[in-house]
Image (tube, rainbow, N blue to C red):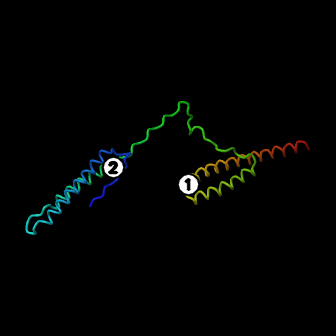
């Protein structure tokens, strides 16, 4: 009639599970005896059991199983921090080395944009987020390369005019 509910043994004390399982077996035995005795009673006599009796026993059994199901998994202990560990938020890891020329940066940007799109399609949002950060870093690096190239070109053209 009732089915045994399996609760993870690692989270719940085995004796508690055995106790509730024993209560369930006792209820099933009680139910079978009462059901048999009811079948043997004539229809004009008082019933062997009442609905209220059965519901009371079932509700108690259900509450006991619910208590076991609600037992939470124990939290894993936190790892102690090393004494000279650096603050991750203070130092941002730029990742792989940045390209040195504008062409190399643009090429890598195109590759990263494609990889980011593929990651989003594959629903790998963590990878897409990492690629987005790298893309942003490359864009700012590209701007600085272009600015330095433009200022270098201005300095070179100024040097040519002074020679004339």
Q: Is residue 46 above or below residue 80?
A: below
Residue at 8 percent across and 66 percent down: it is 45
**In whole angstroms, how far apart are the C-alphas of marks 1 and 2?**
32 Å
116 or 60, which lies in front? Answer: 60
The x, y position of residue 143, in whole percent, is 70, 48
Crowd tier of the residue under label 2, counting other residues whose Cα lies within 10 Å: few below 14, some 14–19, many 20 or above: few
Decide which of tag 1 and tag 2 comes sooner along the chain: 2
Relative to 38, is 94 above or below? above
Give the foreground label among 1 and 2.
2
Name the residue that disc number 1 marks.
125
- Residue in the image at 31% along x and 55% along y: 4
Query: Considering the image in quadrants, where does the N terminus appear?
Result: bottom left
Looking at the image, which residue sits at the far right?
Answer: 164
Name the foreground residue: 74 vs 21.
21
Left or right, residue 11 beside residue 118: left
Q: How many marks?
A: 2
Label drawn at residue 70: 2
Q: Nearer the viewer, residue 3 or 59?
A: 3
Q: Secondary structure at mark 2?
A: loop
Horizontal relation, residue 126 to residue 135: left or right: left
Image point 48% across, 34% down: which residue? 80
Q: Residue 38: image x %, image y %? A: 14, 64
């Amino acid at each position: 009639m009732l089915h045994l509910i399996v609760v993870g043994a690692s989270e719940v004390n085995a004796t508690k599970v055995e106790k509730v399982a024993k209560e369930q077996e006792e209820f099933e035995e009680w139910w079978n005896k009462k059901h048999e005795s009811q079948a043997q009673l004539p229809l004009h006599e008082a019933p062997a059991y009442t609905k209220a009796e059965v519901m009371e026993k079932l509700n108690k059994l259900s509450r006991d199983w619910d208590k076991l199901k609600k037992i939470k998994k124990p939290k894993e202990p936190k790892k102690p921090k090393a004494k000279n560990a650096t603050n991750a938020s203070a130092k941002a890891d730029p990742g792989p080395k940045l390209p040195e020329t504008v062409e190399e940066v643009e090429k890598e940007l195109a590759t990263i944009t494609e990889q980011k799109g593929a990651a989003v399609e594959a629903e790998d949002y963590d990878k897409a987020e990492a690629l987005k950060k790298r893309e942003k870093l490359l864009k700012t690096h590209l701007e600085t390369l272009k600015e330095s190239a433009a200022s270098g070109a201005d300095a070179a053209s100024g040097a040519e005019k002074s020679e004339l």
